[in-house]
């Protein structure tokens, strides 16, 4: 909830403005003078509405003080002495706007909405810049497979066609999307990323396409969506396979016509935004199940780039490991280097979590390292198996044996389907063993609880099997 500070020496004015702003759903604090206003501003507010003439510190001093405390907080100045000099001075010091007394509540509400909208956009732009700086990094890989990927990126970057990036989780699909953007003519425009699996349908639609004021409960102001924020640049849609059906329809229209309406609006908005989508799912198999639209698939899959898992590009592990080691040694201010034994373990590990897992392992190792050289003691237990030797596994249960069988119509013969069936059987066996305690199952399988829940949803393991 947005917090608005009202400063006016007249009690009747404070009461009227408080009622009006609270009716719009704002958290309001009202004070009678400038000194109290600055005290409240120290606690944090989203907008200040201050009278120009007050005892103690006046409105100009309040404005100056608020901007020192929080430069991003907008200020609206009220005055009954509406001279040009007053307005010029207030605007010069950073006021968003001023309003002449007497004024209508509608007039003030309009200025409040505009001030809060500008503050939100400024915060959002800053957030996007910080996210871009935090997440961007070089593409590392000199092996034959990655050289082919690099060449393909160079070719597709020059066009404006949609790109579909495929690969297991943790293989660097977002990094590929950023490289496409960086090498394109759109590199001077914004790069905006959205994880389609992280948001509910209603929130995701608003996030992508924006919404108008009053479109739903809590929509106090209109808001631009990610398509508009990415205008002239690139929009990266991660986990596109999790996109709800209703949003798929709207996305298809944007791809075909480059236009859409905000949620709750009827104004057609046109954008020049390139789409790069990514998924770890097999979308072709999702189509006959009704989980993904066929027309949307072919519209997105104009050009596809498939990223190999880390186990298929072991020649790149030394360079990747050195990159992450240097990064975390710098961030944690702990000089560290890698022994030959540690590197050998990294090269021969199977890396089910791909590059993301390697990154986490190196961060952990630098944190735990007591000297200036990483040792095998700084590595997780699963990596400490003899190099090239798989960890011993218990005898398979009947469910696992059944999941790996092939050759009959009731059992899948396709490799991906068989692996999915095997994964489902392993998870189901663990769930039954630990009586559906997800925390214990996640620990036993070496998964995050959120990853386990995702896989349970993927395989339709809802808990009914336990009844």
Image: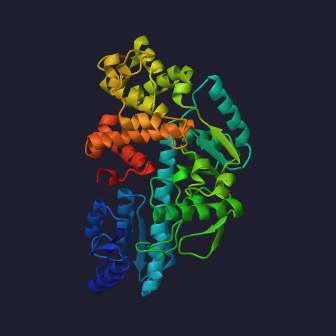
Number of on-image labels:
0
Q: Position of residue 353 (x, y in %)?
A: 45, 33
Q: Quadrant of the N terminus?
A: bottom left
Q: Residue placed farthest to the top in the image? A: 340
361 vs 183, left or right, is left
- Is residue 465 visible from the viewing direction of this image? yes
Q: Quadrant of the C terminus?
A: bottom left
119 vs 373, left or right, is right
* Residue displayed at 62% across by 39% down: 179
- Is residue 94 visible from the viewing direction of this image? no
Q: Tell me the quarter of the picture where residue 77 sits.
A: bottom left
Q: Tell me the quarter of the picture where residue 41 sits.
A: bottom left
Q: Position of residue 56 (x, y in %)?
A: 27, 71
354 vs 152, left or right, is left
Q: Position of residue 138 (x, y in %)?
A: 56, 32
Q: Closest to the observer: 372 or 348?
A: 348
246 vs 120, left or right, is right
């Amino acid at each position: 909830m947005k917090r608005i500070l009202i400063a006016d020496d007249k009690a009747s004015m404070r009461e009227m403005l408080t009622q009006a702003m609270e009716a719009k759903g704002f958290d309001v604090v009202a004070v009678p003078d400038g000194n109290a206003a600055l005290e409240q501003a120290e606690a944090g507010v989203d907008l200040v509405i201050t009278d120009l003439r007050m005892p103690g510190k006046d409105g100009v001093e309040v404005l100056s003080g608020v901007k020192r405390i929080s430069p991003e907080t907008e200020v609206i100045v009220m005055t009954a002495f509406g001279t040009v000099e007053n307005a010029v001075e207030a605007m010069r010091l950073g006021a968003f706007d001023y309003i002449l007394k007497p004024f209508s509540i509608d007039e003030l509400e309009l200025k409040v909405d505009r001030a809060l909208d500008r503050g939100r956009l400024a915060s959002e732009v800053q957030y996007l810049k910080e996210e871009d700086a935090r997440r961007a990094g070089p593409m590392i890989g000199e092996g034959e497979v990655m050289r082919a990927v690099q060449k393909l990126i160079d070719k597709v970057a020059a066009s404006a066609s949609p790109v579909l990036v495929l690969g297991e989780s943790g293989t660097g699909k977002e990094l590929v999307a950023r490289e496409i953007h960086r090498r394109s003519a759109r590199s001077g425009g914004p790069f905006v990323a959205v994880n389609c699996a992280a948001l509910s349908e209603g929130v995701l639609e608003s996030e992508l396409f924006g919404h108008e004021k009053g479109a739903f409960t809590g929509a106090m102001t209109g808001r631009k969506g990610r398509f508009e924020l990415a205008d002239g640049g690139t929009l990266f849609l991660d986990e596109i396979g999790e996109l709800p059906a209703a949003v798929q329809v709207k996305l298809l229209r944007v791809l075909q016509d480059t236009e859409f309406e905000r949620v709750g609006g009827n104004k057609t908005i046109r954008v020049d935004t390139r789409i790069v989508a990514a998924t770890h799912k097999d979308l072709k198999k999702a189509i006959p199940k009704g989980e993904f639209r066929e027309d949307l698939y072919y519209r997105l899959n104009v050009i596809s780039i498939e990223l190999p898992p880390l186990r298929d590009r072991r020649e790149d592990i030394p360079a990747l490991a050195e990159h992450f080691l240097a990064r975390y040694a710098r961030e944690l201010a702990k000089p560290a280097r890698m022994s030959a034994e540690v590197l050998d373990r990294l090269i021969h590990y199977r890396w089910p979590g791909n590059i993301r897992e390697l990154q986490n392992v190196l961060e952990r190792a630098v944190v735990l390292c007591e000297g200036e050289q990483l040792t095998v003691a700084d590595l997780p237990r699963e990596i400490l198996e003899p190099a090239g030797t798989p960890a011993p596994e218990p005898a398979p249960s009947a469910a696992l044996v059944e999941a790996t069988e092939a050759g009959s119509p009731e059992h899948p013969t396709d490799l991906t389907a068989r692996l999915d069936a095997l994964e489902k059987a392993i998870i189901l066996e663990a769930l039954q063993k630990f009586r559906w305690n997800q925390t214990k199952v996640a620990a036993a399988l070496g998964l995050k609880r959120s990853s386990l829940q995702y896989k349970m949803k993927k395989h339709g393991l809802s808990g009914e099997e336990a009844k």
